[in-house]
Amino acid sequence: MIQRIQSLFLLVAGLLVGLLFNVDLATVTDVQPQSLIFADGKFTLLDNIGLSLFYGIAGLLSIIAIFLFNNRKLQSLLGRLAGISLILGSILGVVVFMKDSPNMTVSPQDTLFIYLPILVLVSLLLALRFIKKDSQLVKSMDRLR
């Protein structure tokens, strides 16, 4: 049942993570050659291999979980792992940003896309909620038989 609501939330999470790879999360007015992440004037997920890895895993697990609608237990596990990967990636992003802050002469301006991981996490949490509801519905139907 790919048309289930949890599949839509997982699809939204996967697409939003894909969008994160194509946008600037923060920018600076002047190029900062001494900075690791603002050397080109913008901060993206591709500036750090760890960020790319964690967010890539989160997006991939979200998309894979869509097709596991027959195995709700595994679908839920992949959704949780995607959420954990997203949280770890966000923590790493903050650490990389803070570590690089002393090297900068101007303050960066964040874009609206910096808050997109929060929407991804909310989408994953809603998907997990509906997976749980679906599982409970199946269990209650089995009891009636």
Image (cartoon, helix red, strand yellow):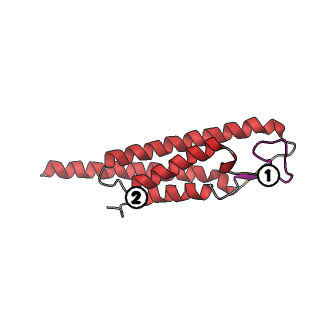
Pointer 1 local density, CA inside 10 Å: few below 14, some 14–19, many at least 20: some
The x, y position of residue 95, in whole percent, is 68, 36
Q: Disc 2 or 1, which lies upstream in sequence? A: 2
In the rendered structure, the answer to whether residue 121 lies left or right of residue 45 reads left
Horizontal and vertical percent position of residue 2 = 35, 62
The dominant secondary structure in magenta is loop
Farthest left residue? 145
State the residue at coordinates (74%, 35%): 99
Q: Is residue 72 above or below residue 97?
A: below
Viewer-nearest of labels 2 and 1?
Answer: 1
Q: Which residue is mark 1?
A: 40
Q: Is residue 35 left or right of residue 1?
A: right
Where is residue 4 shown, x and y percent of the image?
A: 35, 61
- Residue 28, percent from left and from top: 81, 51
- Magenta stretch holds residue 34: yes
Kind of residue at disc 2: Ser
Residue at 57 percent across and 49 percent down: it is 118
Side of 96 where 141 appears, left or right: left
Q: Which residue is mark 2?
A: 7
Between the residue at mark 2 and the residue at mark 1, the CA separation in whole angstroms equals 37 Å
The region drawn magenta spans 25-40
Q: Circle 1 sits in a helix, a strand or a loop, which is it?
A: loop
